[in-house]
Amino acid sequence: MSTMAVQRGYAGYLLRPAIVVLCALCWTSFVRFAVGQTGQLSVDASPQTARKIPDKMFGIFFEEINHAGAGGLWAELVSNRGFEAGGPNTPSNIDPWFIIGNESSIIVGTDRTSSFERNPVALRMEVLCDSKGTNVCPSGGVGVYNPGYWGMNIERRKSYKGISPTIRSSDAVSLSVSLRSSDGLQKLASRTITGGKKQFTNWTKIEFHLKSSINNTNSRLQITTTKTGVVWLDQVSVMPSDTYMGHGFRKDLASMLADLKPQFLKFPGGNYAMGNYLRNAFQWGDTVGPWEERPGHFNDAWGYWTDDGLGFFEFLQLAEDLGASPVWVVNDGASANEEVSTARIASLVKDVVDGIEFARGGPKTTWGSVRAAMGHPQPFKLDYVSIGNQECWMLYYRGNYQKFYSAIKASYPDINIISSCDKSTISPSNPADLYDVHVYASSANMFSRTSMFDNTPRSGPKAIVSEYAVTGNDAGKGTLVAALAEAAFLVGLEKNSDVVEMASCAPLFVNDNDRRWSPDAIVFNSWQHYGCPNYWMLHFFKDSSGATFHPTTMQISSYDQMVASAITWQSPKDKSTYLKIKVVNFGSKAVDLNITVMGLESGIKSSGSKKTVLTSAAPLDENSFQQPEKVAPVSSPLADATQQMGVSVSPYSLTSFDLLLEPSKHSSI
């Protein structure tokens, strides 16, 4: 997210709840009393006017916001696994870990005895009680527990991998590691770690698997003992064994991304990449290598700690798993409150070039060998680098940008470099392959932006609209009307795809327990998830990348609340070709629409076409865990599809007509 976007996004929440209710009543009355309308939609499907939409037109933008990654897409169940979140000074806060027992039986704190140079803090448990004697431990023992990110979802018969380097200087060790209910009373799975006096004199990495016999969506990890002595813990991890593609991503959430067929993945964020201060910016080099050796950092832009298990390598891996092109947002020496001058930027420029070598270098190069050691000897296909996050207004941006541009192009001339400045600033002396655009607006304003790029000069670099979203009063936590406004905006991007190369919404994810921003496309907690209306809206555009665009003309008297687009696309499953006509009705009137298709080289088959509608009873309707598909697409066969047909378009709706074309004669460009 951009800094300007933050200011715009929160402004809408200052409106009083009464106004929201009043607006909802207005929407409802509009739908109830609106009078029907008639109109004409003409589609020119002739080859002469057809134009190919860019192959990477629609993708996704991931930012570590709302606990999207830590406690979300990244499947690690333990929060603050390395005990570093309390800072480097010890003893420090171990939140969210809790102590089991009182000060007469155990003293828990942190010290700097870890074996990991980059994350020196470890947990120290001094156990004062024993299984026998004068100070007997309470039943179940003493120790610590971790509730994860608002509860761990533990599923019956599924395996969970645990890792913990532990140390005990002189005495034997006997630790019980268990998954339990949130109150600790119900044991789901357990493992006992034991060893003699010499076994744990030095830091020792222990790996084990836990398999639960019970489902529990609000579980915790518990480590206890009834043996007196001192035990140190560090880098305590619990990961599901079954993750997306086996690469550590939460399977249900990653599958929702895959269902969108994204053509690119922009990462790791906007403000998150910058940080409020440079010390808290995303530093790619600190996020590669073994997970337990990464120092982690405080995400000061959005107010929480991340252990960087979801790091540079994992973002590249996720893009590969999704079949998407990675788009790396690099820190250009600027944070929200600091900026490195051009005279001092050289080391940061070199760091970015090194990062590209990590992604693209051969397995024997300095940084490519690090990637290879992580299990990926083949280079990743990193073809896009975005310099900064909408910081063109800052004092040193343009000078710094040119340093990054020159250095990257010198080593990797094929990489597409994205500028944070607008198109008017780009010239031979300030070159760019693409320029970044962020659009945050009310629903009405977003709908009007369907024509935003109509008058853009057709030569020069194209735009990547990497962040767009409806914000404000009627956006709610993801309303139908917000999704329709964004759909109209995307229709405009399709129409202008000769000057717009790529587009992605923002933000992508929100953990329902930590809403830093609304609305978002996908909502989740430890065990549930659902797509907001704008997530389902994106499904209407997932076949557009690389498809053939056809001009359309809409004629409706005294009604300017409808926009439409048309493409031909080929199904990857059976190679059938469809003419897809999308119609957004942003208004309160039902429309009887006469559709005329001209210039088709082959006819429309008599069967096999379908109609898909995204709508609901009221424009402010939202999805929820209780009603996850209250606003979701509904498909039905479209009988008697022809080149001239009458259709009905509901108020406040997005409708897609997929017309199955006869084979052989049709050709796409």
Image (cartoon, rainbow, N blue to C red):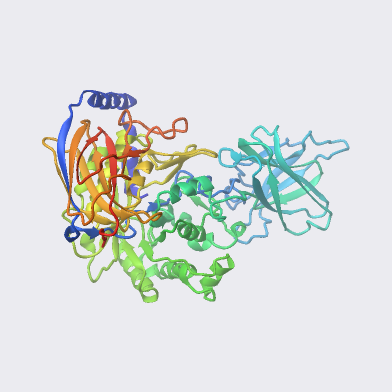
Foreground pick, 482 / 595: 595
Q: For the view shown, which residue lies furthest in the left direction?
A: 557
Judge by depth and name the residue closer to the eye, 183 or 92: 183
> Could one spot residue 286 in this view of the protein?
yes
Farthest-out residue, front: 606
Q: Residue at x 64, y 44 (%)?
A: 158
Residue 264 as seen in the image, left or right of residue 653: right
Task: Tell whether 357 sits left or right of 439.
Answer: right
Q: Is residue 620 left or right of residue 244?
A: left
Q: Quadrant of residue 563?
A: top left
Image quadrant occupied by the C terminus: bottom left
Q: Where residue 40 appears, x then y in whole percent?
A: 15, 41
Q: Tell how many labels.
A: 0
Residue 390 versus residue 347 in the image, above or below: above
Residue 348 image-quadrant placement? bottom left
Where is residue 508 shown, x and y percent of the image? 41, 46
Q: Is residue 440 visible?
A: no
x and y, in percent, of residue 503 in the image? 32, 53
Establish if 403 lies above or below 424. Answer: below
Q: Position of residue 460 (x, y in %)?
A: 22, 65
Residue placed at 54% from the left, 76% from the top? Answer: 364
